[in-house]
Amino acid sequence: MTRSARSTVADMRTAAGHSPLQWLRFYRYTKKEARIINKANPNWTWPDVPFNDMEAVKQRVNAQLAIDNIPQVNSDVIWWRMILCMRDVRAHASAQASAEATVADTRQKRPFDPVRDV
């Protein structure tokens, strides 16, 4: 099966040949990779990642899957998952940064209160 924008999790899990528990492990590995990419390049989406780095991600994920005796995945499954995962990691990082900025702004705007601030 090839990836498409309409592919569902069930479609891709079937294409990968994973059980639900194996798929969860695959999710964990890809999320870890997405976080690493996002930390180094916060504005990147999966298509922005250089081809050699994409291949390295695929190899690392498949190596981890092999250690766990889980079927390895092809480029279509990796591509589909990393598109979504990178989007989610970017959104989470953005929301976290906004929340931290809001807390910092709140702390700066309140006047000193000797009861609260001591």
Image (cartoon, rainbow, N blue to C red):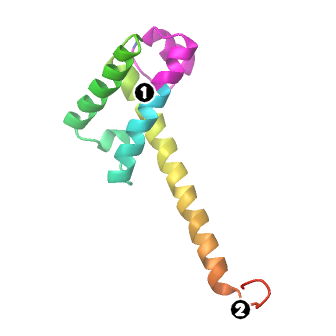
Q: Which residue is mark 1?
A: 80
Counting from the top left corner in percent of width and height, residue 12 is at 48, 17
Disc 2 vs disc 1: Cβ atoms closer than 8 Å?
no
The quarter of the picture where the N terminus appears is top left
Residue extending furthest left? 52
Counting from the top left corner in percent of width and height, residue 109 is at 66, 86
How crowded pointer 1 is (Cα within 10 Å; few <14, some 14-19, many 20+) is rated as: some
Q: Earlier in the sequence, mark 2 or mark 1?
A: 1
Q: Is residue 19 magenta?
A: yes
Counting from the top left corner in percent of width and height, residue 107 is at 65, 80
Q: Quadrant of residue 58?
A: top left
Q: Main secondary structure of the magenta part?
A: helix
Q: Residue at x 37, y 28 (%)?
A: 79
The quarter of the picture where the C terminus appears is bottom right
**The disc labelled 1 sits on which kind of residue?**
Trp
Q: Is residue 115 left or right of residue 22?
A: right
Q: Is residue 14 magenta?
A: yes
Whether residue 29 is situated above or below residue 19 in the rendered picture = below
Q: CA distance from mark 2 to mark 1?
A: 51 Å
Q: Residue at x 39, y 10 (%)?
A: 71
Q: Which mark is residue 106?
A: none
Residue 5 or residue 52, whichever sits in front: 52
Q: Which residue is mark 2?
A: 112
Q: Nearer the viewer, mark 2 or mark 1?
A: 2
Q: Which residues are magenta?
A: 2-26
Disc 1 on helix, strand or loop? helix
**The disc labelled 2 sits on which kind of residue?**
Phe
Please say whether residue 8 is visible from this viewpoint: no
Residue extending furthest front? 118
Q: Quadrant of residue 48?
A: top left
Whether residue 102 is situated above or below residue 14 in the rendered picture = below
Whether residue 29 is situated above or below residue 117 in the rendered picture = above
